[in-house]
Amino acid sequence: MIKILIREPLVHFLLVGASLFLLYQIMQTPDGNTPNRIVISPGQMERMQAQFKRTWIREPTQEDTDRLIKGYVRDEVYYREALALGLDQNDPQVRQRMRMKLEFLLQDLNAENPPSDTVLNTFLQQNPERFFIQPRVSLQQVYLSPDKRKDFDADAQRILKQLQQGISAGTLGDVSMLPFELSKAPQHQVRQTFGEVFASEVVKLPVGDWSGPIYSNMGVHLVKVTAQEAGYLPDLEQVRQQVERDYLAQRRQQLKDKAYTKLREGYEVVIEEAVAQKETDAKFTGEAVAAMQAGEAGQK
Amino acid sequence: MKLINMKPVCAAVGAALLLLGTPVIAQITHSTEGQANVHRGKPYSPYAQRAFPTQVLWGEAHLHTGYSMDAGVIGNRLLHEEAYRFARGEEVTASSGQQVKLSRPLDWISITDHSDQMGFVQDLIKGDPVVMKSEQGKRWNAGINAGGQEAAEAGMDLVTNFAQGTFDPELIKAYAPGSPKYASIWEHIVNTADAFNEPGRFTTLIGYEWTSLVNGGNMHRNVIFRGGASKAGQAVPMSMTPPYGSPDPLDLYKWLQDYEDKTGSQVMAISHNGNLSNGIMFPVDKQYTGREIDKKYVEARAKWEPLYEVTQIKGDGEAHPFLSPNDEFADYYTWDEGSLDLQVAKTDDMLQYEYAREALKNGLVLEDKLGTNPYKFGMVGGTDSHTSMAATEEDNFMGKTTAYEASPTRMVHPFQKTEVGERNAWDMQNAGLQAVWAEENTREAIFDAMQRKETYATTGSRIGVRFFGGWDFTVDDVTSRQPASNGYEKGVPMGGDLTPVEGKTVPTFMVYAIKDPLWANLDRIQIIKGWMDEKGKTHEKVYDVAWSDNRKPDANGKVPPVGNTVDIKKANWSNTIGASELTTVWTDPDFDASQRAFYYARVMEIPTPTWIVYDALKYGIDLPEDSVKIAQERAYTSPIWYTP
């Protein structure tokens, strides 16, 4: 099944998408419907109009409403005929949709109330790595391009002396797209800008005076670290939004897992011999491996 | 402390600068400290506010999660939360069970799930009267609101009742889909985006994909919102399915206009994968409906579609070798077998309506005819990954879908195979990224930069590029301390417009690029010019303008290949060729002031191994014989247009 989907993923889902959408809208069969009778109740009408309004942010005109009804009837006819033929069976998209829907329903029934400060504080303390404020560095740098200098080491020493004597950095070194200064840059930004080696070296430099040289795969740098801020674990107030977000995410995941375990308890799973053999064979194809891995990951 | 590959780099930038003429060489050799042009017109203080964008922000505006039906069915279980975490640089567990992390965070992202599944409904319990009428509902509500252990127990009680079929049917009914109380999944999406949006650090732009598909031809657009949940949440996304939606871009434009009128906020659309549209992405005469391309179409398209996604996993769409036979780099991850679904084969006559460069050219013709250029777009890259993971590094590729997340067998399975043709898994391009020159990392600043097309695309690595056009640029501007300051002062940035200026005869372009600090050196910068002659015929030309390693251009100005250091067995290369930075000011030698034209820069990296080479090394497997093992990653800037 997955193979087929991979071949033509979009066509499949687009064709099915529209009818699926309506499938969920009409799960409660309006009163008065019989197999050969399609009744559009005031409630159904209202729902279609509400959906229209939510899409287009305006009331539907009579023409729009006529189109909505036509579309609904067409979908309904196909939907009922398809159900009668059992086309909902063994369809991976229908199954996926059903699973997702139930997961959502269970999750939402377990709705989120705001957790207390105590709970959040505990969560913060238990997960310091998530909320840790990275060390930040402010620096200025003078760049020497090896392309433009015969003896960049000697030049570096000479220019370093000039810098230490107070000659303005804006007039020294070579032109480059590299920034002259970084202000309160977190570690990852230093790395993104100057590369790995520079980022690991710069934290070892003294604060307040020109030093170096530091080498990067761009060239040579003389650096004045103007401020080093150590990393720290912030107070709840500083990161409340993130802590709450992460806490709720974790709680939702736990509830989802528990809910699955609970539902799963109601089932006995039998793997019959011949079937088991087939599954082993199937393991040798990439799709099967990926699908199984995906299935397992989803059940965690 | 080691100086990595220093010597060749010397030669490289040196060579590039040699082009700039003797005065520069004098400047460089003496490396005189204290040039006259330092900080011209700007305060020395680096802390003083600058009135132009100084930051390049990396992100992408094309990512799918498990909410996208096709992604979910193939097994993607990660939703927006995980996608944001991953983009921010956190480690996540992929749907295939493996741990994945980016080498460095993205600055921003827009998740764009297909709108055709968003009708899916979701309900909330908030002590609503309907819930409270039910005994069970009242009990659970109390428990959940008590929090902690009690909430957990209430949750379990609820699930137990559900599993045993003892759930109050009235309660289910009240919250069942189709009930008047439904909220769409869209609300969840916009709220999650707000929760992860941290101005200054990580920006989440709200978005969705309008997945228009006609006979398998791709006309997809990503819709990107400037506002947050309070704005974007006012409407649910438009789908392509009637009666609520439509596959016609003209109807999408109407939706976008309605949205802006009602909310007072802004929105834009970014089309992608013209290469899989079978000739309907950039129409010149007629739309796919048969409707003539008229003023209405060109004006709406120009208004709503300022950008085009030029490169992504499903191929590169800048240029096609059939359309650009003289461009040796045009055949790059070319997907030209057929339509998106590979049901309808491609014919050569379709290509002119599919590729960015050709569309930019055709746009000049349409502007001449109808007064507006519908294809005046800037360039962006995206992944279109359906795994919730935007991972564009060749040694960190997580595939197009969950079925193609890293595994020993993924590369040998056909990606698509029909009677029309076959696309190999190794044809997947690990691309792309969108770089934005913005004043700050916020929704507003990024959206506005996108609106003015101050963006560029890369095929995945983080190449830095600046591109300015003006009438007076000289070598001094690019060798000054603040070339960008000169760029904005004397010209326009990428995405901008040039018009004739009294007394000026030839436009000049200042372009400079810096390598990805964690990846490969640069081979060359090219400027690609497209123009329309007096007969209404379009032309294009690729100029090599800056390059590494002291290479000598041939008689036609073409610079020979940079060489190749890739060791396929070891999945390695070395930065012993190429340059870490390239800069130049280029003057158009063939300029004709009476002709409409556009110019954009293409920055080429030196050859590096493709993702399958890393797969082969990590899994100890053999590479398919005819697979693409070496590639030159690149950046495409937004064009600058000249209009007489």
Image (spheres, rainbow, N blue to C red):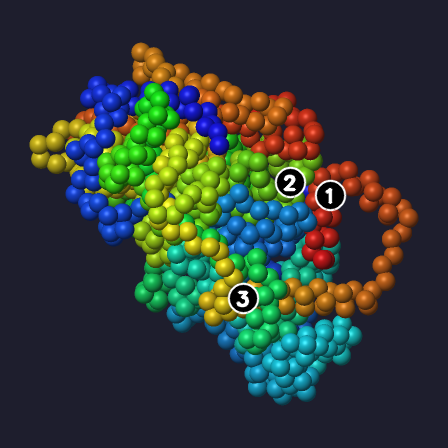
| Residue drawn where x is 37% and y is 16% of the image | B551
**What kind of element bears circle 1?**
helix
Where residue A202 sits, quadrant-wise, is top left
Residue assigned mark 2? B406
Tag 2: amino acid? Ala
Rendered image: mark on residue A243: 3
Tell me the crowding category of disc 2: few under 14, some 14 to 19, or many 20 or more residues within 10 angstroms, Cα based: many
In the rendering, at what x and y percent does residue B191 appear?
49, 66
Q: Place residue B143 in its image quadrant.
A: bottom right
Q: A136 or B604: which is nearer to us?
A: A136
Please state which amino acid type lies under the numbered disc 1. Val
| Image disc number at residue A289 | 1
> B51 and B349: which one is in front?
B51
The amino acid type found where label 3 is placed reads: Val
Q: How many marks?
A: 3
Circles 2 and 3 on the same subunit: no
Q: Secondary structure at mark 2?
A: loop
Find residue B302 and report its horizontal and vertical position in percent: 31, 47
Q: Is residue B453 above or below residue A300?
A: above
Q: Are the residues flagged by discs 2 and 3 in contact, CB closer than 8 Å?
A: no
- Mark 2–mark 1 Cα distance, whole angstroms, equals 11 Å
Residue beneath the point at 35% across and 25% down: A154
Q: CA distance from mark 3 to mark 1?
A: 36 Å
Tell me the chain of label 1.
A
